[in-house]
Image: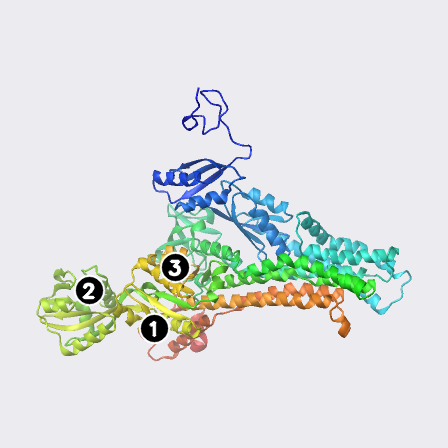
Amino acid sequence: MECVRERCPAFPMRRGCTVTGEDTDTRADTTRTADMKVSGMHCATCALTVEKALMGVEGVADAEVDFAGERAIVRYDPEKTGLADLEKAVEGSGFGVVHEQVTIRIGGMTCAMCVQAVEKALNRLEGVVNATVNLGAERAYVTYNPHVVGVDQMKGAIEEAGYRYLGTKDDDSGAAEQAAFERELRTMAIRFSVGFAISLPLFAIGILGIPLPVPMDWFMFLVTLPVFLWLSAPIFRAAVRSLKHGILNMDVMYSMGIGVAYGASILGTLGIVLTPEFLFYDTAVMLASFLTLGRYLEARAKGRTSEAIKKLIGLQAKTATRLRDGSEEQVPIEEVAVGDTLLVRPGEKVPVDGEVVSGESYVDESMITGEPVPVLKSKGDTIVGGTINKNSVITLVSTRVGKDTMLAGIIRMVELAQGSKPPVQRVADRAVTYFIPAVLSIAIAALCIWYIILDATLLFSITVLISVLVVACPCALGLATPTAVTVGIGRGAELGILIKNGEALEISESLTTVLFDKTGTLTMGAPRVTDIAVSGIDEPALLSIAASVENNSQHPLAEAIVARAAGDGIGPEEVRHFDTYSGKGVAALYGETRVLIGNRALMEDHGVSIPPELLDDLDAREREGKTAVLVAAGDAVVGVIAIADTLKPSAAEAIACLKEMGLEVAMITGDNARTAAAVARQAGIDRVLAEVLPGDKAREVEALQKRGERVAFVGDGINDAPALARSDVGIAIGSGTDVAIETGEIVLIHDDLRDAVAAVQLSRKVMSRIKLNLFWAFAYNAALIPVAAGILYPFFGITFRPELAGLAMALSSVTVVSLSLLLKRYIPPATQRARKEEEQKLKRIAIDPVCTMEVDEETALFTADYRGEKYYFCAPGCKRAFEEDPEKYL
């Protein structure tokens, strides 16, 4: 009887054939099954497309795609193909593979070779898409397929490589990790303190020739043996572990140095091969102490590199006050769900993202946005979790909780960015690969050259060998980039600038062109009344007439007029017989007067004349690219209201700063050329790309790139997402859409274009610090290794004692980390200028006679009305401080 596999019900399960009784399982023992989550499928045809693509991969025995469950189950021969090939096949067919990400805490890493060892161990796991390790943060950032590999396998791989798995970011091991870190610091402090307490007196005895009642060599041996074994044990254990896995790292090199020093001393003491003059007991203990001291200082410094992320995590509230059935209950933050009603008292943290439903209060958002002035929140306003309620009780309804809150998203974004590697780090990674073999070769060559060729004493030759082994420091190379990236990205988060990856830092340094979208990016994104001209009527009367009529319209221009009237305290009145004229305007009876509001065509249709003085104003406003709305009462035009999407206050200054930095600035918009030119003129932009459809913006970016430009695109809307993705660096305005924010490599939390300038300045600063770190690391090794090898001895009689070599090694990596930590205090010039202008503005408010200051005695809140704008100040006791010295207070 014939077996038809394709139609056999036993085939998918690989059971015995129900027809012939034969075993249908034809798979080799090595066949594996991959379970992949596929995104982007919309119908059964999509599933068939994915299935066909997978079956086309060599080595795939069977592929089944479940459209409803969005899963693909593939059986394949791992000797012919792998998970990466399967994922490429899915992506090549136009769909995506969904992965998960995990951040793992790792202990025991000391240099760049350790980073490579952990990355190699994790990337070898089937199902791991990518794994990068940040030595400064001591974290591994892993992207993986959860259906193929899990955290348990990653833990096993890390421990198998000889390092400590300290848990993931999301578990409760953060406190345990901190406790372990502090315990390790204490242990290292005790070790190097005891080491120096023993080695320094012995060093002094040897240098000063202080006589002892027992032989010097035996005295030093007996005194140093227990200390040396205890102090150097972690170094030798790490070296053995590394050699076991075929890795040459810092521990291997250093253990060779101190091992040779102590071993030679023992041989000299016992008179085996060497003589008693070979006394390096104190040197070996001192070298081990210096290494431990260096790692202690390095660990403390590295701990400070991630302070920014710790501050962000510390902003998260632990509990919330939930209102249920008219009563209050205190609940853990994990129990808050979307739709819960929460009460926030003065001084408390806002627990989650939400919308204010009752109450009014000032909220300090400085920790999220960097803005120092508290923001007034009232009913209908959105509020961000982690901010601080200042002065009054508010009630909110939660809209985003847990990992979906803005603060959680910022933390996640910053952590992933700190784990990324800019391309410049590849230089250091390649250098480290060859560094230690090169140093070992130099050390052995120096020993042979001095002893065999130059006929130096064996004592001198061994001293040179030890000095070369202990002075070389790959740690500085390994720490140069990740510490600067970690501190720089953390500093950006503090300033309200979220940089998503290290590559964005490097590209931002080499930008040539910054391309701005107009609407919502350079401009406010909504029409506003900019100018009013009247004839035979005063301005309030004109606004009253126009607002009363336009209040019946839903047109954006009508809303702008009503909003301007409301801002001036003018409310709409009742009108009759409201009518619209498509593309021209509206009409209504205001009292008994016929009112027309619209363009020239509407006036011409109704035979309404325009006074000469208003005609001149009308022409001027239209030349400026503004929309001029004519208002006629009766048979004559009585006013012109100019409306435009106004430029943001910070736009012109941001453009000027970018030009000062040598960057070309251009604007792209779908608006007509006249309107675009008017906005560009106000902003100080010379190059304008007008009448560009949303879908063509990405093509315009590509055209610039083909001309050799490195382009940054600044935008905020859904139309901008393709252009943001196509540009070399996408800068998304944080007040824009989620799509734009997800697409941009740099996200500005608050809507200030000067932050786009600050982002470029910060990127340049971080890259210059990385280059300085790398220069220091390379220069240190390039200068001191030859000196330790004795290159200066024939000419100047200068040698490098092993003790000094050990000290130099300890200080080199500490210096690199310290240089990175200086970024914590960096303030971009654009931010400095913005702060200075704000301070000057506040001072002008305090002394300007046009300013009126009102004080709420109950809340001690100041409201300053200055030239039609309101400014708010709040702080405990601010009334008394202001009365004593207003200028000093502000």
Name the residue type under label 1: Asp
Q: Within 10 Å of the Cα at label 3, are there few (<14), some (14-19), or many (20+) other Cα atoms? A: many
The residue shown at (63%, 47%) is 161
Q: Is residue 125 above or below residue 559?
A: above
Q: Nearer the viewer, residue 565 or 152?
A: 152
Task: Using the image as rendered, state which of residue 326 and residue 109 is in the foreground.
Answer: 109
Q: Residues within 10 Å of mark 2 (few under 14, many from 20)?
A: some
Position of residue 289 measured from the top left corner of the image (x, y, whole percent)? 73, 60
Q: Using the numbered discs, state the Cα–Cα distance from disc 1 to disc 3 in whole angstroms.
A: 22 Å
Residue 356, compared with residue 881, is above or below; it is above
On the rendered structure, is 520 left or right of 366? left
Check if mark 1's residue and mark 2's residue have beta carbons within 8 Å: no
Q: Nearer the viewer, residue 31 or 480?
A: 31
Sequence-first tag of 2 and 3:
2
Mark 1 to mark 2: distance in Å?
Answer: 42 Å
* Residue 863 horizontal/vertical position (percent): 36, 70
Question: Which mark sits nearer the N-terminus, 1 or 2?
Answer: 2
In the visual, does 186 lie left or right of 756?
right
- Would residue 60 be found to the left or right of residue 786 on screen? left
Type of residue at label 2? Pro
Task: Residue 724: give its label.
Answer: 3
Q: Residue 328 at x, y = what percent?
A: 42, 49
Q: Position of residue 375 (x, y in %)?
A: 39, 64
The answer to whether the residue labelled 2 contacts the one labelled 3, judged by CB atoms less than 8 Å apart, is: no
The residue carrying mark 1 is 686
Q: Dividing the picture into quarters, in which one does residue 259 lie? A: bottom right
Disc 3 marks a residue whose amino acid type is: Leu
Closer to viewer: mark 1 or mark 2? 1
Residue linked to disc 2: 572
Q: CA distance from mark 2 to mark 3?
A: 42 Å
Mark count: 3
